[in-house]
Each structure stands twice: as C-alpha cells, then as structure tokens.
Amino acid sequence: MKLKSIGFFREMSQGKETDPSIHDVIRKGDQLLVEQICNYLSNGTTAILSPGITKDIIDEAAGAAGTGSSCTDGIWLWPDDLVYYVRKYNIALPDDFLNTMKANSWKNPGKDLDLSEEALIVDGTEL
Amino acid sequence: MGAGYHGGFGATKGSRRVIVADSSLVGNGRGFQLKEAAKRVKKIEGYTDVAVHGSPDSISVMINKNGTERKITLDHRRLAKFLKSDEGYKKGNIRLLSCRTGSETGTFAQNLANKMGVTVRAPSDTLFIFPNGKMVIGPDMRTNSGRWIDYHPRKGAKE
C-alpha cells in the first residue's frame, strides 16, 4: 500500500528536520471543523504500531498526547497523536489532507483496513 | 516451555490480566490493535511477549474516567505483581514489546529481570511494529538503529 505521510512535525519524536514546525500552525485551523477532523483521524487504522506514550510537544507539563503509532485512511499516514493537537490546539492541517476528508464526507474509509499482507510504501520508500 | 503472547488490553474490572493499554485506547480500538500487532510478531521459544506502552523507567497506563484522562505510571514491581497473578504468564523469560524499556539509560528491564528472576529482553529505543510483523527499533519508523538487549537477573539485587 502506498501512503503519503502528513501531520508529522519536526518537534515530534518521529518527525524529521525537514518537517514543518507545529508552532507555525497552532490556532490556525477552522474551529468549525475540529470535531469532524478529529472524528476522521480517530477512525483510521493503525498502520504502524508503537507501544509508547508520547508527550505534548507544545506544553510538556500537559502530559501524554497519545502513542507513537501511525494511522492511515488508505491514502495518508499520520501520527496517532495528531488528533490530540487538532483538538487541543486547533492546529491547521494541509489542504490536501482536508480535501480528502471532505471528499469522503468526513467519514474515514480506512477504518478497519487489513494491512497484514501489505508492504507499506511511505513517501515512495518501502518500510 | 513455549513462547507465547501475553496480556490483556484494558482495565477490565475484575480482570486478572495485565493491563497493557489504557482504557481510553481500548475504547477507541487502538488497544486491540496493539493486541493484534503483538500477535503478528515472530515468537521466540522460551519467551513470553508482554505488550505495554513503555518508557526507559516505567510503563504507562492511561485511565479515562468520566471523560477525564490521566496517566498512571507503573514501575517494575507493579508489572511483576500483575504478571505473577496473570493466567497468561506461567514462567520463563519475558520479551517486552514496549518502547525504550531496554534503554541503557533506563532501569526498567533490569529491575524487572531482578524482580522476576528471569531474563527480560527489551528494545533499546522506540519500537515500531508493522502489519506484517516486522519490527523496527530506532528513533523513527524509518531508522532501524536500535537493538534488543537481554537483561539477566542479578544475584543479590533487591528489587
């Protein structure tokens, strides 16, 4: 399955230096869409599971943000804790990602995907 | 002694199983995905896999009570207590499918080995489990720079 990574930020433990900074998108999302976005993100399938708790990278004192896993809708791959940042900080997500959600009427088509027989190709690289 | 998968996946009231994922994660299905992922990894003879959200010095359980989420940190003693009373664990070595619990800067795996009196194998860095059972140990899912480390019980250690 070919996936495109999205919603990774350089401040995250598994973010890359070339990823955008989360500080540039805080409070820049559409507040009216937060619930729909969170619902979409929460209903993806865990593609890569990481059994560790991640901390809030904006306010470390806030504690846990989620897990280190990555989730998918069959098109995009995003960090499990992305939903936390959307809900708590209303971070803005890229238009391409939002357009996919809108095109799917905000219902995640990737819920309960069976990926067990799939090779994962993320951003053109097989993992 | 056979290898196996061990662990329940939620704070089920009355359960005798080890709590390996927080109740909120179980509630939206991610806890069960942890269970499924743990089943897919290649087993090692003589080791029981214990899947739990971890860190170098502790494991974490998230409890969602009345809509309020809080993290509960368990040390090796609490996990050992759970394991010893759990039907899924008989005896033998333990492999922790748990992020960074084998980190050389941490103490969790060594302390658990001392407490349980068995070898504990744990990842040195963050663990990533792929749908086909492949595991990567490293700072991110693309970088397999870590390793499994065996921690053997130390005689005389009071843990």
Image (cartoon, coloured by chain):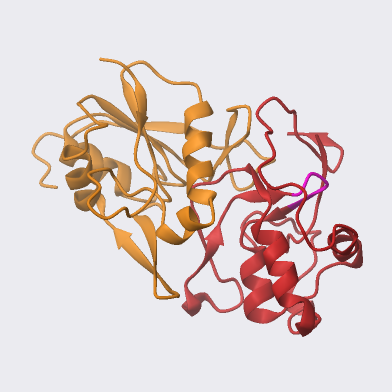
Residue located 58% across and 42% down the image: B138
B77 vs A47, left or right, is: left
Residue B92 drawn above or below residue B79: above
Residue A60 drawn above or below residue B84: below
- Viewer-proximal residue among B65 and B129: B65
- Viewer-proximal residue among B101 and B16: B16
Residue located 20% across and 27% down the image: B90
The image shows residue B17 at horizontal and vertical percentages of 27, 43
A124 vs B74, left or right, is: right
The image shows residue B18 at horizontal and vertical percentages of 29, 45
Residue located 40% across and 75% down the image: B66
Q: Which chain is red?
A: A
The image shows residue A55 at horizontal and vertical percentages of 52, 66
Q: Does residue A11 appear anywhere in the picture?
A: no
Q: Which chain is orange?
A: B
- Viewer-proximal residue among A74 and B132: A74
Tell me which secondary structure the magenta stretch mostly adopts: loop
| Count of marks, rendered view | 0
Q: Does residue B38 appear anywhere in the picture?
A: yes
- What residue span does the magenta drawing correspond to? A73-77
